[in-house]
Amino acid sequence: MPFRQVLTQAHKLKTSALEIEAVGDISPAQLTASGRRELRHLLKSHDVDAVALLAPLRRGLDVADGLDRRVDYLKQTLTLSFDLGPRLVVVSIGKAPEDDKDPRYPLLRGALEDLSRHGDRVGARLALETGLESADTLKAFLSGFDTGSLAVCYNPGALLAGGFNVYEGLRTLHDRVIHAHARDARLVSVMGRAQEVPVGHGDIDWLQLAGAFEEIDYRGCLIVDGDKLGTAEVSASVAFLRRIFG
């Protein structure tokens, strides 16, 4: 829906935070300095904080074709996130390699080193979304970077769909998690395939997960993803989370 309509809906739901997709009219290449000032004003007038920008990629940072364009887009989005206030960009980078012998390793590491230097320079962080690899693999991969610009966006639904432990994974990544997507999934086949469903209607035990968030002293946001859910489902998901997290 149009962004002004999104803000009106967010205000009606009394949500305090919004994650903005950096595409279309709100892509860094399209949003001028005056447009950025107008966007900050719109957010303030609707009493909604932008807490992160979402940077969707058609391919990961482990694919050579078009990599420079994707890295440049992410650099621009990091700068935009600073201009708009959240100073945080969420991205799915592709599957983190388990060791440096993986042929994808130098591509992914080089891209992230470049992005982390840019993040350090402009004062913004990149949060890598979980789900394609285990928490242990992602933690080991990130341990090789000497920067404060790389963090983790925790996505329990994606982890569940990948066959990973949702609760232990959060504990494993506790010192890296600065943002979280509240997504749920239901396993629909013996092959482990999962279908995304509204929060509270899947196989995630949200009371147990809330305990894990409390255990790691997480104080960030839980973002309901409205991309695949209708307005009524988003509203129900927000209401469910309020009952669980208070």
Image (cartoon, grey):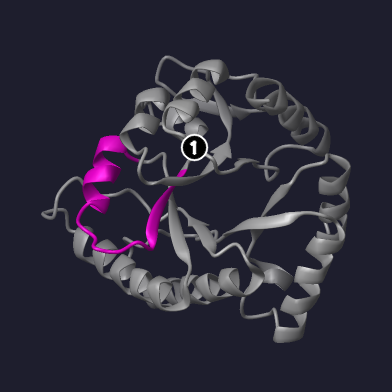
Task: Give the quadrant of residue 183.
Answer: top right
Task: Give the quadrant of residue 22.
Answer: bottom right
The image position of residue 117, as x and y in percent, is 34, 74
User: Which residue is more in the foreground, 126 or 176?
Assistant: 176
The image position of residue 75, as x and y in percent, is 47, 75
- The amino acid type, in three-letter code, at marker 1 is Tyr
Q: Which residue is drawn at 55% across and 61% down?
A: 55
Element under disc 1: loop
Q: What stretch is highlighted in magenta?
A: 133-153
Q: Name the residue under label 1.
A: 218
The stretch drawn in magenta includes residue 140: yes
- With 230 as the anchor, is 8 left or right in this view? right
Quadrant, the C terminus: top right
Quadrant, the N terminus: bottom right
Task: Give the quadrant of residue 221.
Answer: top right
- With 151 as the anchor, is 51 left or right in this view? right
The image position of residue 5, as x and y in percent, is 87, 55
Q: Residue at x 77, y 70 (%)?
A: 39
Residue 16 vertical position relative to residue 80 in the rendered view, above or below: above
The image position of residue 64, as x and y in percent, is 31, 69
